[in-house]
Every structure is written in structure tokens, then in C-alpha cells.
Image (cartoon, grey):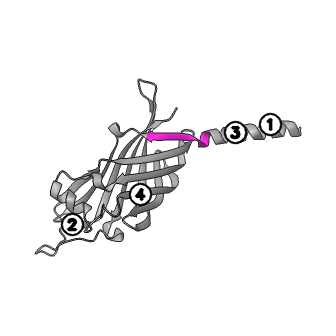
Amino acid sequence: MKKIFLASFILVLSTTLTFAQTKWVIDKAHSKVQFSVSHLVITDVVGQFKKYDIKVETNGDDFTNAKIEFTADVNSIDTENEGRDKHLKSDDFFNAEKFPQIKFIGKKMEKVGDGKFKLTGDFTIRDVTKPITLDVTFRGIVKDPWGNTKAGFKIKGVVNRFDYNLKWNNLMETGGAVVGKDVEITVNLELNKQK
């Protein structure tokens, strides 16, 4: 009886460990990391980071409590305006020379509804790390025509840039700020399951 129990325990343990090692890598051709912030109160400037990486580990195909690590290269920032991009890389904003990466380390991926998750983790810009919670929409798992298993997500959140010492601004005659304080983050993410 003890031998049967021990064998069953080892089988369950090995299965659990196998599930825990499921890794996903980003499909950059079908993913994008964007941000938007208000300009002159009347419109939004939209930008993206062209160089970034994300590492995801799950229990099989279950993304509940997935381990997530994200980094973006500040020097890859692109708002389709060279002068503005240079300003964003300066010490007025990101200080790309001293702080070349933005980081997010996921702490908790909690299912809150059908295909809906709350992703909580530590977000680092410059030398400031603060907890944030992001809204995640899980768009499903499919196999592409070449036999690759894919998972799709849309991730959204808002951060106050002043919290991360991105404090540059000018005031307009009307009293409004040239650049808004709240930055909207949108990530369209397609992951490939490693074989």
C-alpha cells in the first residue's frame, strides 16, 4: 500500500513539475507595446517601444498565477517625431542613458471573469518601483497552420507618470498642462508555446 501511495505521489509531483515548466515566448511580428498621453488637453500622443521582451511561465495552458517578466528598451521609444523621442530619452523624462530599461515583474495573475484577469506586479521606471494592477483580456489559445500553439492577450492599464519622476511639463495660457499626467498602456500580445 505504501509503495502504491509513493508511486502515485511521485507521478502527481512529476506531472505538476512538468506543467510548471510550460514556457511561452513572444511573437513580435504580432505584438505591440504602446502608450498614450494627452497633449494640450485636446488630443493624445501615441507611442510605442520597438524593442522589448517578455518571459511567461504557466501551469500547462492555464495562465492563472502565470510568472511574467517584461522589459522594454527605453532607447527604442518611438512617437514618430525624432525631436520628441530625443526629449523623452533625456533626464526630463526617462533618462535612457542612466536607466535604459523599463521593467515589470508580475506577482499575481487573478482570474476575475470569463477571459478576464487582473495582473498585479512591480513596475519600474528610472529608479522608482511601484505596484500596479493591469486589466488583462485573454483572447484564447489556438494552433496556427504550422502547428504552433499560440495564446493571445490584450493588456491595459494607467500609470501616473509623476509617480516615476517623469515630471517635465509646461502650462498653457488656459492653465492646462501641455502633457497629461496619466499614461495609458496598451499591450497586444501574441505568445508562442515552446515545444
Q: Is residue 91 left or right of residue 153?
A: left
User: Residue type at mark 4?
Assistant: Lys
Q: Residue at x 31, y 66 (%)?
A: 161
Q: Is the residue under label 1 in contact with that under label 2 (CB below 8 Å)? A: no
For the residues marked 2 and 3, what is the alpha-carbon distance in whole angstroms? 53 Å
Which residues lie in the magenta part? 19-25
Pick whichever, 76 or 105, lies toward us: 76
Disc with the residue nearer the chain's start (1 vs 3): 1
User: Residue type at mark 3?
Assistant: Ser
Look at mark 1 in the image and give the residue it sits on. 7
Q: Dot 4, how many residues are within 10 Å of its Cα: few (below 14), some (14-19), or many (20+)?
A: many
Q: How far from the left and from the top, in percent, is residue 120?
A: 48, 58
Look at mark 3 in the image and give the residue it sits on. 14
Q: Is residue 63 left or right of residue 71?
A: right
Which disc is residue 179 wearing? Answer: 2
User: Residue type at mark 1?
Assistant: Ala
Tell me the SS state at disc 4: strand
Which disc is residue 103 wearing? Answer: 4
Disc with the residue nearer the chain's start (2 vs 4): 4
For the residues marked 2 and 1, what is the alpha-carbon distance in whole angstroms? 63 Å
